[in-house]
Image (cartoon, helix red, strand yellow):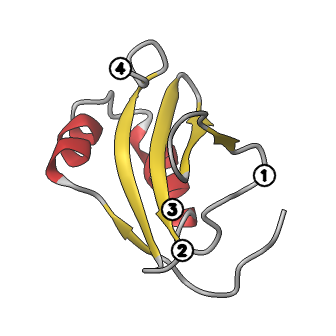
Amino acid sequence: MTRYSVSYFVKLPPTARKQLHSLPKKFLPKIIARIDDLSSDPRPPRVKKLSGKLDTHRIRQGPYRIVYQVRDEDGVVLILSVADRKDAYR
């Protein structure tokens, strides 16, 4: 994997923000830390690229999945979903 020295801007749209706020409080610090880390490395180790979707990836944090899209040309990481693994891909 390539390490990035360029900082990315992480966007959290209202739908993802609502999902994040609905999660149990005990998981929030680690999930927020994982999202923050995406600004320095949008493709960290153990990231999975989702098939059939352009530049869409997911990372795991406990029983939750963070699904996001990397826009290298804009320097943006767009968070699409923060949800339990059973609901993350719907």
Q: Residues within 10 Å of mark 2 (few under 14, many from 20)?
A: few
Look at mark 4 in the image and give the residue it sits on: 90
Mark 1 falls on what kind of element? loop
Look at mark 1 in the image and give the residue it sits on: 45
Mark 3 falls on what kind of element? strand
Q: Earlier in the sequence, mark 2 or mark 4?
A: 2
Q: Quadrant of the N terminus?
A: bottom right
Look at mark 3 in the image and give the residue it sits on: 70
Question: Residue at coordinates 55% horizontally, 84% vertically from top-left?
Answer: 7
Q: On the image, which quarter does residue 58 sit in?
A: top right
Q: Which mark is residue 85?
A: none
82 vs 12: above or below: above
Q: Which residue type does callout 2 highlight?
A: Asp
Residue nearer the viewer, 66 or 50: 50
Mark 2 falls on what kind of element? loop
Compute the Cα span from label 4 to label 3: 19 Å
- Position of residue 25 measured from the top left corner of the image (x, y, whole percent): 33, 34
Q: Which mark is residue 72?
A: 2
Of badges 3 and 1, nearer the viewer stands: 3
Q: Earlier in the sequence, mark 3 or mark 1?
A: 1
14 vs 81: above or below: below
Compute the Cα span from label 3 to label 1: 15 Å
Q: Which residue type does callout 1 highlight?
A: Pro
